[in-house]
Image (cartoon, grey):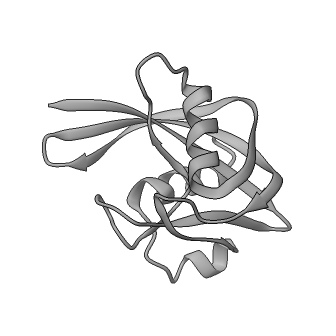
């Protein structure tokens, strides 16, 4: 079984959450919070910041890690996701790993194709478990 660490950032503004449309597998075409693999030598926070900048531009990580959890990325491949909160500090635009970057309300997200791990993150953040 392969296990990779990933880092993600939840960015809220004006009652909406920033999502990116995944440009690559797994779950290509699905919407997700910005994030990706932790590179060798990076802290989870550094990885979350790097991924945020690569995927959406002007976002800065705030505070310490909210939570972590393990989820299945594929058969025989799991991710340990480390979740942080972020804030907009500049221009937000889709980067190389994202087909689009847009803001959505939680009600709108209920009718969208959202990655399974993003659903877990949003349910925990919304439920006050983070």
Quadrant where the image shows the C terminus: top right
Residue 89, percent from left and from top: 84, 49
Q: Residue at position x 54%, y 77% from top?
A: 110
Direction front: furthest residue: 96
Residue 53 versus residue 119 in the image, above or below: above
Direction top: furthest residue: 41
Residue 111, percent from left and from top: 51, 83
Residue 13, percent from left and from top: 82, 62
Q: Would you identify the image quadrant in which residue 17 lies?
A: bottom right
Q: Residue at position x 48%, y 53% from top?
A: 120
84 horizontally vs 14: left or right: left
Residue 60, percent from left and from top: 76, 41
1 horizontally vs 18: left or right: left
Q: Would you identify the image quadrant in which residue 86 lies?
A: top right
Residue 20 versus residue 121 in the image, above or below: below
Quadrant where the image shows the N terminus: top left
Whether residue 45 is visible: yes
Whether residue 130 is visible: no
Residue 80 versus residue 60 in the image, above or below: above
Residue 102 versus residue 76 in the image, above or below: below
How many numbered marks appear?
Answer: 0
Q: Residue at position x 56%, y 56% from top?
A: 33
Q: Residue at position x 40%, y 20% from top?
A: 40
């Amino acid at each position: 079984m392969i296990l990779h660490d990933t880092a993600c950032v939840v960015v809220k503004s004006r009652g909406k959450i920033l999502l990116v449309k995944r440009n690559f597998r797994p779950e290509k075409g699905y919407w997700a919070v910005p994030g990706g693999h932790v590179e060798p030598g990076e802290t989870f926070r550094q990885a979350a910041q790097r991924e945020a900048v690569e995927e959406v531009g002007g976002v800065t990580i705030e505070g310490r890690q909210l939570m972590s959890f393990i989820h299945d990325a594929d058969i025989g491949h799991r991710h340990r996701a480390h979740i942080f909160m972020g804030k907009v500090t500049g221009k937000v635009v889709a980067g190389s790993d994202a087909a689009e970057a847009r803001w959505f309300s939680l009600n709108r997200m209920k009718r969208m194709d959202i990655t399974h791990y993003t659903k877990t993150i949003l349910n925990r953040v919304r439920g006050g478990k983070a």
